[in-house]
Image (spheres, helix red, strand yellow):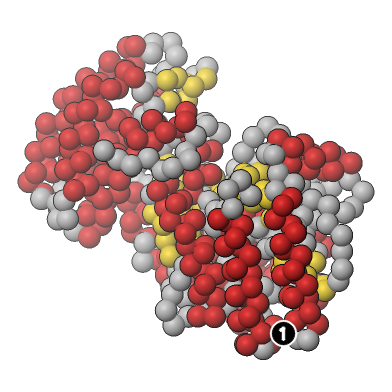
């Protein structure tokens, strides 16, 4: 029996257990077909994929609202699951067996689709059902990692060149900042982001100063993200855009932290502030000591029951009005190192901040990567809630901060800490993609040459998965 990830919402646990095997089987089938295009005829491929997609339906967007179809498909699901398990368990798929499975499933597939339309007459149209069976959409979960994250821009550009546009973007830490630019417009313009980053300087975005905290955890570097980016996210209604005004649905993961943790972070903040005033960012030994200290603090935070929780901004009615700059600012605020806060005169946001903290039973917001560095789970839950008009999706996780021997070794302890929560989110991704070549985590404001290298690396590396993504998102129409 498929293991259900721990701590999953009770109302989604059974749905995950029932449907995840079909996601895994389709992914295994597509990988086999990309490796050997002659392995199966197109008609047989379409039958198998349609059967898997019909079996994984639980709720379908109907003409007058969502239609629950999961219970009606129970018997059909059992039939298809035997084929799905066979596909998942084989290391080398046999073309003759696949063709035989497709031939056996075809009449059952047609009967079940007709029966489902009959049972939901007046609530579910043939067009709506066909769309949910045949058309898969891409969802991006964009991970954090400081300067490592600029490689994501190359991935966005590669996807755009393939004609693949996401139906949802979820981001953590710098992945939320770059993901915000991807969500601003339906299409992705590499030139726009390049122009934006070329105007940024470290001194304009960060300052070493003592500042009181209101909604944030303390940090030695104050992040002035609004000064740098607000003009690119102006709302037609005036002021800065809210999360629900973006062209592509966007959710931003932050970590909610209880007040008890702040007593510990003050110590590390003072250490880091002292090193910064000595110019420590340019000294390898000092950076190593700082990484050791922050890992010690974060390890204690993660290990303390009830000290923190993931909060997904933009995923509910309360937070859809969240200011986009504030959302990604909090998501990028690594305790003791980077501090972002709402200090301006903005009664609406101050009231919303108080509500968010109270609703989630936390006292502060911090870097989303602490709780979920590649937020595939938040993306999956958002899709299952019906917010993007389909539940037939492929979740692509983009991990720029995975431990790698020989690259950014000084940050290896921090990478391993992040990898622990990435492994939990892996269970909700169709594909968790790990980059091999990234900038340094300290390249928060890269020079033009470094940025162009990151763009090239992202394009080149994700291009290896281009055929797989194109096949996975190919319309499976009879």
Q: Is any atom of residue 170 visible in this view?
A: yes
Q: Provide the secondary structure element on which disc 1 rests.
A: helix
Q: Would you say 212 lies left or right of 46 here?
A: right
- Locate residue 370, reporting x and y percent: 59, 57
- Where 338 falls versus 366 (above or below)? below
| Most foreground residue, 204 or 106 | 204
- Locate residue 300, reporting x and y percent: 60, 60
The structure residue drawn at horizontal position 74% and vertical position 37%, both measured from the top left corner, is 358
- Where 464 falls versus 373 (above or below)? below
- Locate residue 296, reporting x and y percent: 60, 68
- Locate residue 435, reporting x and y percent: 45, 69
Q: Is any atom of residue 199 visible in this view?
A: no
The structure residue drawn at horizontal position 11% and vertical position 31%, both measured from the top left corner, is 104
Residue 35 position by quadrant: bottom left
The structure residue drawn at horizontal position 34% and vertical position 11%, both measured from the top left corner, is 119
The structure residue drawn at horizontal position 52% and vertical position 44%, both measured from the top left corner, is 379
* Label 1 crowd bin: few (<14), some (14–19), many (20+), radius 10 Å: some
Q: Which residue is mark 1?
A: 280
Q: Quadrant of the N terminus?
A: top left
| Most foreground residue, 195 or 454 | 454
| Most foreground residue, 54 or 79 | 79
| Most foreground residue, 471 or 381 | 381
Q: Quadrant of the C terminus?
A: top left
């Amino acid at each position: 029996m498929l293991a259900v990830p721990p701590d999953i919402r009770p109302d989604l646990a059974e749905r995950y257990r029932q449907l995840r095997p079909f996601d895994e089987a389709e992914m295994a089938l597509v990988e086999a077909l990309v490796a050997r295009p002659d392995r199966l005829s197109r008609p047989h491929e379409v039958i198998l994929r349609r059967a898997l997609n019909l079996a994984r339906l639980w709720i379908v967007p109907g003409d007058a609202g969502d239609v629950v179809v999961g219970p009606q498909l129970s018997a059909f699901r059992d039939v298809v699951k035997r084929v799905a398990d066979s596909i998942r368990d084989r290391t080398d798929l046999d073309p003759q067996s696949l063709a035989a499975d497709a031939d056996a499933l075809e009449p059952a597939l047609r009967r079940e689709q007709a029966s489902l339309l009959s049972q939901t007459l007046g609530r579910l149209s043939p067009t709506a059902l066909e769309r949910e069976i045949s058309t898969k959409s891409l969802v991006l979960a964009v991970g954090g990692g400081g300067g490592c994250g600029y490689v994501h821009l190359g991935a966005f550009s590669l996807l755009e060149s393939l004609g693949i546009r996401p139906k949802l973007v979820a981001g953590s830490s710098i992945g939320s900042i770059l993901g915000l630019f991807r969500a601003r417009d339906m299409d992705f313009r590499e030139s726009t982001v390049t122009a934006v980053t070329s105007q940024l300087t470290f001194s304009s975005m960060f300052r070493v100063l003592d500042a009181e905290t209101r909604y944030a955890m303390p940090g030695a570097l104050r992040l002035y993200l609004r000064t740098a980016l607000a003009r690119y996210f102006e709302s037609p209604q005036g002021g800065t855009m809210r999360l629900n005004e973006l062209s592509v649905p966007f959710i931003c993961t932050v970590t909610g932290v209880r007040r008890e943790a702040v007593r510990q972070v003050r110590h590390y903040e003072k250490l880091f502030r002292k090193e910064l005033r000595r110019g420590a960012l340019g000294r390898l030994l000092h950076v190593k000591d700082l990484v050791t200290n922050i890992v010690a603090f974060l390890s204690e935070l993660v290990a303390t029951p009830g000290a923190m929780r993931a909060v997904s901004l933009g995923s509910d009615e309360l937070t859809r009005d969240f200011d986009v700059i504030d959302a990604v600012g909090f998501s990028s605020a690594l305790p003791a190192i980077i501090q972002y806060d709402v200090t301006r005169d903005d009664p609406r946001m101050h009231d919303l901040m108080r509500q968010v903290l109270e609703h989630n039973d936390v006292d502060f917001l911090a870097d989303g990567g602490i709780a979920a560095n590649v937020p595939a789970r938040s993306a999956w839950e958002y899709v299952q809630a019906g917010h993007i008009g389909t539940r037939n999706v492929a979740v692509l996780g983009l991990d720029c901060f995975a431990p790698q021997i020989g690259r950014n070794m000084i940050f290896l302890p921090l990478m391993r800490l992040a990898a622990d929560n990435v492994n939990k989110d892996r269970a909700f991704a169709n594909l968790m993609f790990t980059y091999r070549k990234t900038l340094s985590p300290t390249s928060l404001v890269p020079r033009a040459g470094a940025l162009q290298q990151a763009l090239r690396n992202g394009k080149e590396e994700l291009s290896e998965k281009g055929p797989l993504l194109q096949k996975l998102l190919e319309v499976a129409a009879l």
